[in-house]
Image (tube, grey):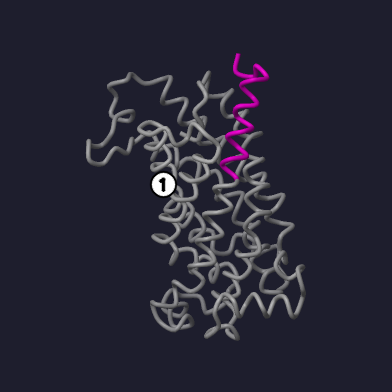
Amino acid sequence: MSHSEVRTSAPREAALALFTGSFYGGVHTVVGHPLDTIKSRLQMDPTMRNASALDVAKSLWKTDGLRGFFRGCVPPLWGSMVYRGIMYSGYEFSFTFIEKGFPDDHFLKNELSPSFPVRPMVVASTVFAASCRGIIESPIEYAKVMGQMKQPWVLTHVYRGVLWQLLRTTALLIPIFSILDVARRKTDLTKTLPGNFVVMSGACGVSYLCCWPLETLKNLAQTGIGGNSLAERIKYLGGWRGVYRGVWPGTIAGSTRNGAGMVAMVFAQKWATDLGLRD
């Protein structure tokens, strides 16, 4: 579950999440884009092959100043508000539909095991949400990555790498939403805004570390850098170790921006309840 408010109906929760998810998306982009730019340069710029994250930061500052860290920010800023709103809307629709429409003893609503307390309804809702998000996100991510690499983008290429995009998004979100759901049900951490930040940033950190190779390969597929096949891209990266290039700035950025975004969305969800939008 993405919030702790009492749900009403699937359509209403979807509508509210479309609004509150846009808060998440806006904060997410502004907070994390500088580190995301460093990550992309480490992954794809051959001149930075042996550089550290600090080296890239110094180069960006020397070349473009503060503007260099926010290069390519406009597409993901408005786009993140749209596709994260759609993602959370899809998730809340599916989650609330199962919660309200299925009996409590249904396998979708129960933990897989006491030692692995993930609920299938969370996984199913996440896959649905990731699919909704991926169709909208792929063109925006393509424009962002091309902007970060100072390359022109082509309209007919906006869905280049879309399969990698969908695979990466689904693999990334399932652990995040599963950890978040367990934390909401079994701990008191998510009852405060700082607690929501800690849980979300921690879940994202774990998920990013596990799924980072898909992030790197997705970026290469979208830009066309490194060849067209998996073998060519691995060779371009200098072997399998190369798929983890940029992992630390990317993970820190992902954890921080998602933690901040969750705080914004939880605040907006509470605000919606206080306004009587769930009555």
Please give the range of residues in magenta.
261-279
Callout 1: SS: helix
The percent position of residue 64, horizontal first and vertical second, equals 77, 75
Amino acid type assigned to the residue bearing label 1 in the image: Ile
Q: Is residue 275 magenta?
A: yes
Q: Residue at x 44, y 73 (%)?
A: 243
Q: Residue at x 54, y 43 (%)?
A: 132
Magenta region, main secondary structure: helix
Residue 183, by quadrant, is top left
Which quarter shows the C terminus? top right
Q: Pick the residue in front: 22 or 60.
A: 60
Q: Is residue 239 left or right of residue 34?
A: left
In the rendered view, tell whether residue 42 sits above or below residue 262. Answer: below
Q: Is residue 222 magenta?
A: no
The percent position of residue 127, horizontal first and vertical second, equals 44, 43
The percent position of residue 213, horizontal first and vertical second, equals 43, 67
Q: Residue at x 58, y 83 (%)?
A: 48
Q: Which residue is mark 1?
A: 174
Q: Residue at x 22, y 36 (%)?
A: 114
In the rendered view, tell whether residue 246 sits above or below residue 8. Answer: below
Q: Pick the residue in front: 152 or 259.
A: 259
